[in-house]
Amino acid sequence: MVARITLVSPAVNAALRQVRFDDAPLDESAARRARAAADALPPHEVMLTAPSERCRGTAEALGLDAAVVRELRDLDVGRWRGRSLDELAQEAPEGIAEWLADPAVTPHGGESVVDLVDRVGNWLESWSGHGGRILAVAEPAVVRAGLVHALAVPAQTFWRLDVAPLSVTELSGRSGRWNLRCGRPLTAAE
């Protein structure tokens, strides 16, 4: 049986605009954009969301009664939590450079990109053979990790994948063989 997994990235919020390693609620403008896009969601039987406030708020604005799934949580950046990339680039440029170059390192003391890819890959494989349509609101890092796993590309590819706010990434397949349909914006029908 083929599983169809649709990953929806959350609407933009202050933390995303500031490139800050933090969670924050959606502002009214972002929630309005998500509500307007709700009718564009593909068909689904299972609704899930990452535990972050941003993802839960997006799921709610999309009208989803989504179960919170811990495996979909964002990359744990340890000591960098609450800090902006600009701040860290000035204070710890070597750590940032190392982190962006080597997906196995954790200069922040949190989770490595390799560990994130493994975690999300295990979650993805757990749905293999489900045969239904799963929709999950997930952080951009989780979407990128899922793509790295599904396409069996090197973990260094993680930083080369852009995931736009309120975009849809669709994976279909089963156990170790996934196909990708990416980059479709989640927008209201014209």
Image: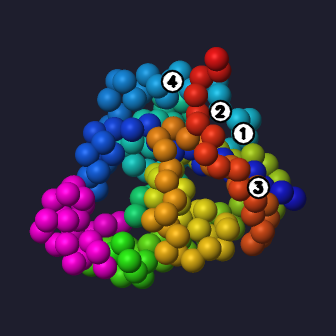
From the viewer's perspective, is residue 123 above or below residue 51?
below
Q: Nearer the viewer, mark 1 or mark 2?
A: 2
Residue 159 in picture, x, y percent from top left: 45, 65
- Which mark is on residue 136? none
The residue under the point 16% across, 72% down is 92
Q: How crowded is mark 1: few (under 14 residues within 10 Å), some or many (20 or more)?
A: some
| Residue type pointed to by label 2 | Leu
Residue 117: percent from left, percent from top: 53, 71
The mark that comes first in sequence, 4 or 3, is: 4
Looking at the rendered structure, the secondary structure element under dot 4 is helix
Is residue 128 in view from this perspective?
Answer: no
The outermost residue toward the right is 1
**Disc number for residue 41:** 2
Q: What residue appears at the point 36 percent right and 82 percent down from the top-left corner?
A: 105
73 over 65 or under it: above or below? below
Residue type marked 3: Ser
